[in-house]
Image: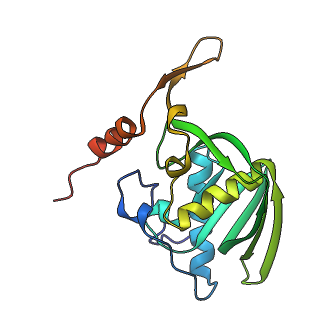
Amino acid sequence: MSRDHYDDLTIVRYGHPALREKAVPVRRVTDSVRRLIERMVELMRAARGLGLAANQLGIPQRVAVVEIDDRFTPLIDPEIVSATGSETGEEGCLSLPRLYGNVPRPTRVVVRARDLFGKRIKLTADGMMARALCHEIDHLNAKLFVDRADESSLYWLMGHTEEGEPITQQTTLEDALKVFVAARPSEK
């Protein structure tokens, strides 16, 4: 396999400007777009995530991947065309590692997108898949889970006990975001 510019990509953290930039549509589905998706899957799996959007790699294109229950779904130019119901569930984000909170999302969504070959597709999803699709499409629209989270539910995952129970620490949105901004290298 030849080395290309996607090999050096890494998941960016909160504070990176691409996370607040609305992604632009993909004009044509090319080998380069397919290679980007391949790299996104590698990074998502290595980070043990359920989904990843291209702007989480600093690339503001409307490309996302989701993998729920070993079912991989690549999405090019996705948009939610309908949403019904509402339920609140816990979410985290690979760009805000170890931070979690409760986020209300639709229980069922219909998403229109294109597949790896540029063919238009329509997906109907509910449960965790609907939540993941909404989360990743939010990324493409420059929104983060903390923008929708119940601020009183935010917490850090500090580790686990010997029995595997999570060790958590409540936080405020302001304090949590300060941690990520403080951790960013200076951009001089």
Screen quadrant of the C terminus: bottom left
Residue 10 position within the rendered picture, expressed as x and y whole percent measured from the top left: 45, 56
Screen quadrant of the N terminus: bottom right
Residue 67 position within the rendered picture, expressed as x and y whole percent measured from the top left: 72, 54
Colour option used: rainbow
Q: Is residue 95 above or below residue 81?
A: above
Q: Residue at image x 47%, y 50%?
A: 95
Q: Is residue 59 above or below residue 24?
A: above
Residue 7 visible to an observer of this rendering: no
- Of residue 150 and residue 113, the one placed in the foreground of this image is 150
Q: Quadrant of residue 17?
A: bottom left
Residue 173 position within the rendered picture, expressed as x and y whole percent measured from the top left: 42, 39
User: Most extreme residue toward the bottom, as rendered?
Assistant: 27
User: Most extreme residue toward the top, as rendered?
Assistant: 162
Q: Residue at image x 49%, y 59%?
A: 56
- Of residue 162 and residue 38, the one placed in the foreground of this image is 162
Count of marks placed on residues: 0
- Of residue 162 and residue 99, the one placed in the foreground of this image is 99
Residue 153 position within the rendered picture, expressed as x and y whole percent measured from the top left: 55, 32
Q: Quadrant of residue 16?
A: bottom left
Q: Is residue 117 above or below residue 14?
A: below
- Of residue 102 and residue 160, the one placed in the foreground of this image is 102
Residue 110 visible to an observer of this rendering: yes
